Image: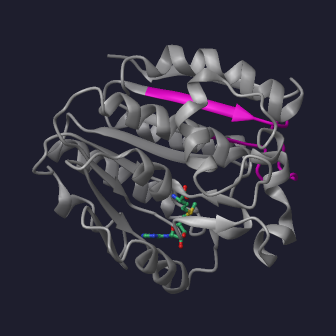
Amino acid sequence: MLSYRHGFHAGNFADVLKHSLLCLTIIELKKKDKPFVYIDTHAGAGAYSLQSPFAEKTGEYRQGIGRLYPSQTFHPLLDSYFAGIRSLNTNSKLSHYPGSPEFVRALMRSQDRMQLSELHGSDFAILQERYRNGRQISVAQEDGLKNLLKKLPPPQKRGLIFIDPSYEVKEDYSSVVDTLAKAYRRFAIGVYCLWYPVIRRETVDNLMAALVETGIKKQLRIEHCILPDSEELGMTGSGLLFINPPWQLESQARELMPWLNDRLTDGMGTWSVDWLVPE
Ligand code: SAM
């Protein structure tokens, strides 16, 4: 039984990294007229109130998006990310935060498609209601990892597969690697993005070793830690592992990360952008 609800964490420092790089990736996919599909295996509720008892209980967003919005210190690489946030808020007040599906919905074109999976009944119901009239959007209450292979290769032959588990069950760490290896065999030209938390460094190292072991080329890793590694402090950082990232993403991340690190941690955090497996 799943208990994780993203509403407790929406807009935190990890969401800022995840969603700003997600928006940059979608912008790159849009540089060609050809349609793409966005497959979100762990979609969540689609958008979140920052005034809900969930968000207020942890207040995590205050160390994340709360440090960037509504203050006007925008970075040009964050234009589309902030446009997504502005669409749910006024310029002077931050009350809502988009989830990954909503950031992509705001950017997709009439020819593009989105397939969302969410397992938790309550978040699925909110997601389904949100995209009830979305002709381009399909929503399923299903195991997004188990059902991914059926969707590949997509008819569009272009797409982003976004894998953002809560890692509530330990098996998630091995399932994501296994699924990525199989998915890549079916759709080797797809762009893949896997989110991971930094809670114990050893767990991250094991995950990265297993990803290298798949033999998949072009794996770019982008990580941001707001605190030094620790076994006691919970999530001290997070990262994204891209397979076949858009070619500009590496340089964009190198430009963005110091800026984000300054804003989110007053320069106290650390970041890295490196090829886990090069071409
Ligand atoms: N991607 C969302 C975003 O960025 O706004 C947040 C997703 S949250 C980190 C992870 C979500 O995955 C939770 O809503 C959880 O209920 C859901 N979930 C967990 N295991 C799942 C599975 N096997 N298939 C689909 N959804 C799952």
Residue 254 in view, yes or no: yes
Compared with 122, 195 (above or below) is above
Q: Which residues are magenta?
A: 220-239
Q: Foreground residue, 167 or 132? A: 132
Compared with 24, 206 (above or below) is below
Compared with 121, 79 (above or below) is above
Looking at the rendered image, the quarter that the N terminus falls into is bottom right
Residue 234 in view, yes or no: no
Residue 254 falls within the magenta-colored stretch: no
Residue depicted at 75% across the width and 64% down the height: 50
Give the left or right position of residue 29, taking residue 202 as reference.
left
Q: Foreground residue, 93 or 119? A: 93
Coloration mode: one colour
Residue depicted at 52% across the width and 43% down the height: 207
Residue 107: quarter of image: top left
Compared with 210, 88 (above or below) is below
Can you give x and y, in whole percent of width and height, for residue 162 in the image?
41, 49
Can you give x and y, in whole percent of width and height, for residue 113 in the image?
25, 54
Q: Foreground residue, 213 or 190? A: 190
Residue 232 falls within the magenta-colored stretch: yes
Give the left or right position of residue 227, taking residue 203 as reference.
right
Can you give x and y, in whole percent of width and height, for residue 60 in the image?
81, 56
Residue 76: quarter of image: top right
Residue depicted at 48% across the width and 40% down the height: 22
Residue depicted at 64% across the width and 73% down the height: 5
Count of marks, rendered view: 0
Give the left or right position of residue 212, taking residue 234 as reference.
left
Can you give x and y, in whole percent of width and height, for residue 6 in the image?
64, 67
